[in-house]
Amino acid sequence: MLYFLSKLILKLNGWKIIGGIPSGVKKCVVIVAPHTSMWDFVWGRLAYWQLGVKVKFLIKKEVFVFPYKRLLIRLGGIPVDRGKSSNLVEEVAKLFKQHDSLFITITPEGTRHYASHWKKGFYYIALKAKVPIALGILDYKKKEGGIGMIMNPSGDFEADFKFIEDFYRGRGAKHPQNYNLN
Protein backbone atom coordinates (compact mmCIF):
# COMPACT_ATOMS: atom_id res chain seq x y z
CA MET A 1 0.00 0.00 0.00
CA LEU A 2 2.81 2.45 0.88
CA TYR A 3 4.36 1.71 -2.51
CA PHE A 4 1.24 2.75 -4.42
CA LEU A 5 0.50 5.73 -2.19
CA SER A 6 4.06 7.03 -2.45
CA LYS A 7 4.11 6.48 -6.21
CA LEU A 8 0.88 8.45 -6.59
CA ILE A 9 2.01 11.35 -4.38
CA LEU A 10 5.38 11.58 -6.13
CA LYS A 11 3.79 11.45 -9.58
CA LEU A 12 1.20 14.10 -8.72
CA ASN A 13 4.04 16.36 -7.55
CA GLY A 14 6.18 15.75 -10.64
CA TRP A 15 8.92 13.66 -8.98
CA LYS A 16 10.65 10.83 -10.83
CA ILE A 17 12.37 8.06 -8.86
CA ILE A 18 15.56 6.59 -10.31
CA GLY A 19 17.92 3.74 -9.54
CA GLY A 20 17.70 1.57 -6.47
CA ILE A 21 19.69 -0.78 -4.30
CA PRO A 22 20.80 -3.86 -6.28
CA SER A 23 19.23 -7.07 -4.94
CA GLY A 24 22.60 -8.49 -3.89
CA VAL A 25 23.34 -5.55 -1.57
CA LYS A 26 21.90 -6.31 1.87
CA LYS A 27 23.74 -3.64 3.87
CA CYS A 28 24.98 -0.16 3.06
CA VAL A 29 25.33 3.40 4.23
CA VAL A 30 23.00 5.53 2.13
CA ILE A 31 24.04 9.15 1.90
CA VAL A 32 21.57 11.68 0.57
CA ALA A 33 22.23 15.19 -0.69
CA PRO A 34 21.42 17.97 -1.03
CA HIS A 35 19.80 18.32 2.40
CA THR A 36 18.55 21.86 2.91
CA SER A 37 14.91 21.45 3.93
CA MET A 38 12.57 19.38 6.09
CA TRP A 39 10.85 18.51 2.79
CA ASP A 40 13.90 16.36 1.99
CA PHE A 41 12.70 13.89 4.61
CA VAL A 42 9.20 13.75 3.10
CA TRP A 43 10.33 13.25 -0.51
CA GLY A 44 13.09 10.88 0.60
CA ARG A 45 10.73 8.73 2.66
CA LEU A 46 8.29 8.52 -0.26
CA ALA A 47 11.14 7.58 -2.61
CA TYR A 48 12.31 4.79 -0.28
CA TRP A 49 8.79 3.41 -0.08
CA GLN A 50 8.51 3.43 -3.86
CA LEU A 51 11.93 1.76 -4.17
CA GLY A 52 10.96 -0.82 -1.54
CA VAL A 53 13.99 -0.01 0.63
CA LYS A 54 13.49 -0.21 4.38
CA VAL A 55 15.93 2.34 5.78
CA LYS A 56 16.99 3.55 9.17
CA PHE A 57 18.25 7.06 9.72
CA LEU A 58 20.30 8.87 12.34
CA ILE A 59 18.60 11.86 13.95
CA LYS A 60 19.39 14.00 16.98
CA LYS A 61 17.92 12.52 20.16
CA GLU A 62 16.28 15.81 21.09
CA VAL A 63 13.44 15.18 18.63
CA PHE A 64 12.57 11.80 20.20
CA VAL A 65 9.90 13.28 22.47
CA PHE A 66 6.15 12.92 22.68
CA PRO A 67 4.30 12.99 20.29
CA TYR A 68 7.06 12.30 17.70
CA LYS A 69 9.04 9.54 19.38
CA ARG A 70 6.85 6.57 18.39
CA LEU A 71 6.45 7.85 14.81
CA LEU A 72 10.19 8.42 14.37
CA ILE A 73 10.99 4.93 15.62
CA ARG A 74 8.40 3.40 13.26
CA LEU A 75 9.88 5.36 10.36
CA GLY A 76 13.35 3.99 11.19
CA GLY A 77 14.82 6.73 13.36
CA ILE A 78 17.90 5.99 15.46
CA PRO A 79 18.49 8.64 18.14
CA VAL A 80 21.98 10.15 18.28
CA ASP A 81 23.36 12.09 21.24
CA ARG A 82 25.36 14.80 19.51
CA GLY A 83 26.35 16.47 22.79
CA LYS A 84 27.98 13.40 24.32
CA SER A 85 31.45 12.49 23.19
CA SER A 86 31.00 8.98 21.89
CA ASN A 87 32.36 6.99 19.05
CA LEU A 88 29.38 7.12 16.72
CA VAL A 89 31.37 5.46 13.93
CA GLU A 90 32.00 2.42 16.15
CA GLU A 91 28.41 2.29 17.38
CA VAL A 92 26.88 2.41 13.91
CA ALA A 93 29.42 -0.06 12.50
CA LYS A 94 28.36 -2.48 15.27
CA LEU A 95 24.75 -2.15 14.13
CA PHE A 96 25.75 -3.49 10.72
CA LYS A 97 27.34 -6.54 12.35
CA GLN A 98 24.14 -7.19 14.33
CA HIS A 99 21.81 -7.28 11.31
CA ASP A 100 21.54 -9.46 8.22
CA SER A 101 20.10 -6.54 6.27
CA LEU A 102 20.54 -2.88 7.16
CA PHE A 103 20.39 0.39 5.24
CA ILE A 104 21.23 3.51 7.22
CA THR A 105 20.65 6.93 5.70
CA ILE A 106 22.98 9.76 6.62
CA THR A 107 23.00 13.31 5.34
CA PRO A 108 26.69 14.20 5.06
CA GLU A 109 25.95 17.91 5.36
CA GLY A 110 24.81 17.18 8.91
CA THR A 111 22.36 20.10 8.89
CA ARG A 112 19.78 21.79 6.69
CA HIS A 113 21.69 25.06 7.04
CA TYR A 114 24.77 25.98 5.06
CA ALA A 115 27.79 23.82 5.91
CA SER A 116 31.13 24.73 4.35
CA HIS A 117 32.22 21.07 4.39
CA TRP A 118 30.59 17.69 4.72
CA LYS A 119 30.97 15.44 7.73
CA LYS A 120 33.15 12.38 7.15
CA GLY A 121 31.57 9.90 9.55
CA PHE A 122 29.48 8.14 6.91
CA TYR A 123 32.66 7.22 5.05
CA TYR A 124 34.38 5.81 8.12
CA ILE A 125 31.24 3.92 9.15
CA ALA A 126 31.15 2.22 5.73
CA LEU A 127 34.87 1.39 5.94
CA LYS A 128 34.64 0.06 9.49
CA ALA A 129 31.50 -1.99 8.76
CA LYS A 130 32.88 -3.14 5.38
CA VAL A 131 29.71 -2.06 3.56
CA PRO A 132 29.23 -0.02 0.38
CA ILE A 133 27.98 3.54 0.17
CA ALA A 134 24.82 4.24 -1.82
CA LEU A 135 24.74 7.73 -3.32
CA GLY A 136 21.16 8.91 -2.83
CA ILE A 137 19.79 11.91 -4.66
CA LEU A 138 17.13 14.53 -4.05
CA ASP A 139 17.45 16.93 -6.97
CA TYR A 140 14.82 19.68 -6.87
CA LYS A 141 15.90 21.14 -10.24
CA LYS A 142 15.14 17.89 -12.05
CA LYS A 143 12.54 16.73 -9.49
CA GLU A 144 14.45 13.47 -9.37
CA GLY A 145 15.13 11.28 -6.35
CA GLY A 146 16.49 7.84 -5.69
CA ILE A 147 19.80 6.00 -5.65
CA GLY A 148 22.31 7.22 -8.20
CA MET A 149 24.93 4.54 -7.67
CA ILE A 150 26.66 2.23 -5.20
CA MET A 151 30.36 2.60 -4.45
CA ASN A 152 32.77 0.66 -2.29
CA PRO A 153 35.05 2.90 -0.25
CA SER A 154 38.65 2.23 -1.25
CA GLY A 155 40.29 3.55 1.92
CA ASP A 156 41.77 6.45 -0.07
CA PHE A 157 39.61 9.06 1.61
CA GLU A 158 40.73 12.03 -0.51
CA ALA A 159 40.08 10.29 -3.83
CA ASP A 160 36.77 8.77 -2.73
CA PHE A 161 35.52 12.03 -1.22
CA LYS A 162 36.41 13.95 -4.38
CA PHE A 163 34.45 11.37 -6.40
CA ILE A 164 31.46 11.72 -4.06
CA GLU A 165 31.53 15.52 -4.11
CA ASP A 166 31.82 15.55 -7.91
CA PHE A 167 28.79 13.23 -8.11
CA TYR A 168 26.72 15.69 -6.05
CA ARG A 169 28.12 18.93 -7.46
CA GLY A 170 25.41 21.04 -9.11
CA ARG A 171 22.44 19.03 -7.80
CA GLY A 172 19.38 21.18 -7.17
CA ALA A 173 18.72 21.87 -3.50
CA LYS A 174 15.36 23.07 -2.20
CA HIS A 175 17.25 26.05 -0.71
CA PRO A 176 20.32 26.46 -2.98
CA GLN A 177 21.91 29.09 -0.71
CA ASN A 178 22.29 26.35 1.93
CA TYR A 179 24.07 23.89 -0.39
CA ASN A 180 27.86 24.10 -0.67
CA LEU A 181 28.25 22.09 -3.89
CA ASN A 182 26.31 24.38 -6.25
Image (tube, grey):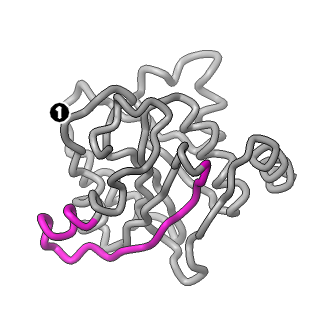
Q: Which residue is mark 1?
A: 85
Give the side of residue 35 with respect to residue 181, left or right: right
Magenta residue span: 143-163
Q: Position of residue 106 (x, y in %)?
A: 40, 48
Q: Position of residue 58 (x, y in %)?
A: 43, 41
User: Residue at image x 75%, y 47%?
Assistant: 10
Few, some or many C-alpha atoms within 10 Å of disc 1 (few <14, some 14-19, many ≥20)?
A: few
Which residue lies most toward the bottom here? 24
Q: Amino acid at mark 1?
A: Ser
Does the segment drawn in magenta span residue 179? no
Q: Position of residue 95 (x, y in %)?
A: 40, 58
Depicted 114 relative to depicted 23: above or below? above
Does the segment drawn in magenta span residue 155? yes
User: Residue at image x 21%, y 62%?
Assistant: 161
User: Residue at image x 17%, y 33%?
Assistant: 85
Depicted 38 relative to depicted 144: above or below? above
Image mark count: 1
User: Residue at image x 58%, y 45%?
Assistant: 76
Element marked by disc 1:
loop
Pick the front one: 39 or 89: 39
